[in-house]
Image (tube, rainbow, N blue to C red):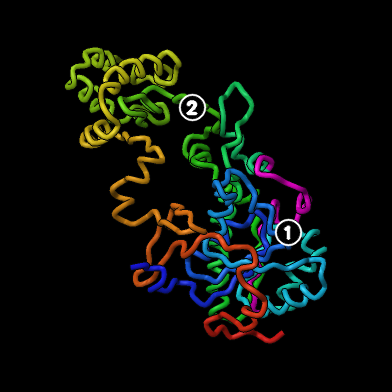
Amino acid sequence: MNHSETMSGPLDGVRVIDLTSRLGAYTGRLLSDLGAEVIRVEPPGGVPERSHAPLTEDGLSFSFAFTEAGKQSLVADSTDTSNAVQLEHLLSTAQMLLTSEGPALLRARDMSPEDVTNRHPGLVHVSISPFGLTGPYADRPASDLTLLAAGGLLGLAGDPDREPLRAWGNQTSVIAGVHAATAALIALLSLESTGRGQVVDLSVQEAVAHSLENAAQYLDLEGVVRHRVGAGPAEAGTGLFKCADGWVYLVGGLGGRPLAWESIIEWLTDQGIEEARTLDADKWQERTWRRSREGSTAFRRIFEKFAVTRTKQELYESGQGRGISVAPVATPEDLINDPQLVARDFFRTIDVGGNKLGFPGSPYRFANAYVGPRSGPPSLGSTSAAKLSTPAGPGYERTPA
């Protein structure tokens, strides 16, 4: 049974007009997964993201498929005045508008958030922009790289003796998408209770600054400002270690303090690694030795002598059984076949023009409601203004203008 066809979603009846670029597209995908009717407004020829590599053999962009799954497509030429009227009517039938430009560009499109919500008091305008709608940087151009830098996350990535390293993909758009979707749901709840919409001002820089791993906790708890540490461990006993079929991640120390150290020594000794007894020396309790390159190298040599003859699953089960924090590093193939994810139906197969594409589902479930992609990305112009002439809402009481 196709649950997406037989069960409604939590946002059934909510219409979202998506005018975003790549920066904000993931927000619409998350709302679509929850059951909202998300209308992607595109120029003639489609948005540029339709051709972003990598592509399937017949030219479908994987990244576009991911961010646009479940949406509909409406073609509208922004230079055509009749389309501006058409868009205004469309906004009057919707509960939410998504944009992803700075204030100057929005004003040029007659989409300034305050003006839009004045014209449509019952509309939530989620404005996703690089630096927010106010402040000296509000209209600065930005990219994934510059936003990672401005938000501080770039400063944590890469080797300490080299330049910062940008993570693959458009991480800032994903970070912004999650934050914006959360704020959008809160604003939608307010709309349900008051009948009035509002502007949600989402700064991508601030969303990135809100996502700095555990840097804030390091400063708060230890008074330490985190810096780049590269791929190597910050201290002995912690980091990635080779095993028979890949890698495991072991946390044998944190903040210069050993964790489950006696259990690690006993684990290795029980398995015939005699050198493990040297880990019982007093120096392994010393912060400076544990955080030295020599200490890290010595531990790695001993542990990998043990790990290289065992699989990551064996190490995971054996170590966790002893109260040691160790985990297998899953490959994409591991994830697809992971018994827990399979049992929970996490990956969904969607038919996209004859292509069977696997999509990650949502990490949350609702009783008696379907959550996740219902279809692949829309073909260009899959819907028309005529089809969208009536409101889709579930009876929101709109406040008159």
Check contact, mark 2 vs mark 1: CB within 8 A.
Answer: no
Magenta segment? 122-146
Q: Residues within 10 Å of mark 2 (few under 14, many from 20)?
A: few
Q: Which residue was labeled with disc 1?
A: 133
Q: Residue at x 39, y 73 (%)?
A: 7
Q: Position of residue 215 (x, y in %)?
A: 52, 39
* Among numbered discs 2 and 1, the one appearing first in the sequence: 1
Q: Position of residue 206 (x, y in %)?
A: 63, 50
Quick check: 27 above or below 305? below
Numbered disc in front, either 2 or 1:
2
- Was residue 128 drawn as part of the magenta stretch in this picture? yes
Q: Residue at x 62, y 40 (%)?
A: 152
- The one nearer the camera, 129 or 343, is 343
Q: Position of 32 compared to 100: left or right?
A: left
Quick check: 89 above or below 373? below
Q: Residue at x 45, y 17 (%)?
A: 292
Q: The residue under label 2 is which amino acid type?
A: Ala
The quarter in which the C terminus is drawn is bottom right
Secondary structure under the numbered disc 2 in the rendered image: loop
- Residue 359 in view: no
Q: Position of residue 18 (x, y in %)?
A: 64, 65
- The one nearer the camera, 3 or 369, is 3
Q: Which residue was labeled with disc 2?
A: 231
Q: Position of 114 compared to 267: left or right?
A: right
Q: The residue under label 1 is which amino acid type?
A: Leu
- Was residue 299 drawn as part of the magenta stretch in this picture? no
